[in-house]
Amino acid sequence: MKDKVILVEMLYEKAEQYTKTTFELYRLKTIDKVTDVFASVASRFAIVAVLALFFVLLTVGMALYIGEILGKNYYGFFTLALFYGVLALVLVKKRKPWLDDKLNNYLINEIFKEKKNASN
């Protein structure tokens, strides 16, 4: 009877240790995935920020050039503002299929990248 009690205690200790180890493993995997996704998003954000600065400077140059052609500098800024306003309307109308779906798919692919690689 004493052997059974010892076996049950050992079984209980092993189950407790397994549960703690499994929890720690899932915690570490979650941290790994979160940091991977954050690093990927942060690097893309940095690229987008540099590209935005490039396009802002390009737009100012284009506005000044168009203004010179039209005779007054502010005409060039008004022309480009109208262009960007129309572009914004198109993006608002097409946001779901062009931007939201692509961003969702990107994040899902980043989160489940390990499972996809493991199955191949």
Image (cartoon, rainbow, N blue to C red):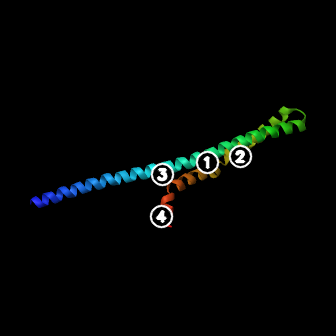
> What's the residue at 36%, 51% (across, down)?
24
Q: Quadrant of residue 1?
A: bottom left
Inter-mark Cα distance, 1 to 4: 25 Å
Tell me, yes or no, if residue 112 can be seen here: yes
What residue is pinned by disc 4? 118
Residue 41 at x, y percent in the picture: 57, 47
Tell me, yes or no, if residue 79 can be seen here: no
Q: Which of marks 4 and 1 precedes in the sequence?
A: 1
> What's the residue at 67%, 46% (across, down)?
93
Q: Nearer the viewer, residue 99 or 12?
A: 12
Q: Which of marks 4 and 2 precedes in the sequence?
A: 2
Determine contact: label 2, label 4, CB under 8 Å: no
Residue 54 at x, y percent in the picture: 73, 42
- The crowding category of the residue bearing disc 3, from other C-alpha atoms within 10 Å (few below 14, some 14 to 19, many at least 20), is some
Q: Say whether residue 18 is left or right of residue 26.
A: left
Residue 104 at x, y percent in the picture: 56, 51
Q: Amino acid at mark 3?
A: Lys
- The crowding category of the residue bearing disc 1, from other C-alpha atoms within 10 Å (few below 14, some 14 to 19, many at least 20), is few
Q: Which of marks 3 and 4 precedes in the sequence?
A: 3
What residue is pinned by disc 1? 44
Q: Amino acid at mark 4?
A: Ala
What residue is pinned by disc 3? 33
Inter-mark Cα distance, 1 to 3: 17 Å
Query: Of the numbered discs in the image, which one, if any, rests on residue 102?
Result: none
Inter-mark Cα distance, 4 to 3: 15 Å
What residue is pinned by disc 2? 90
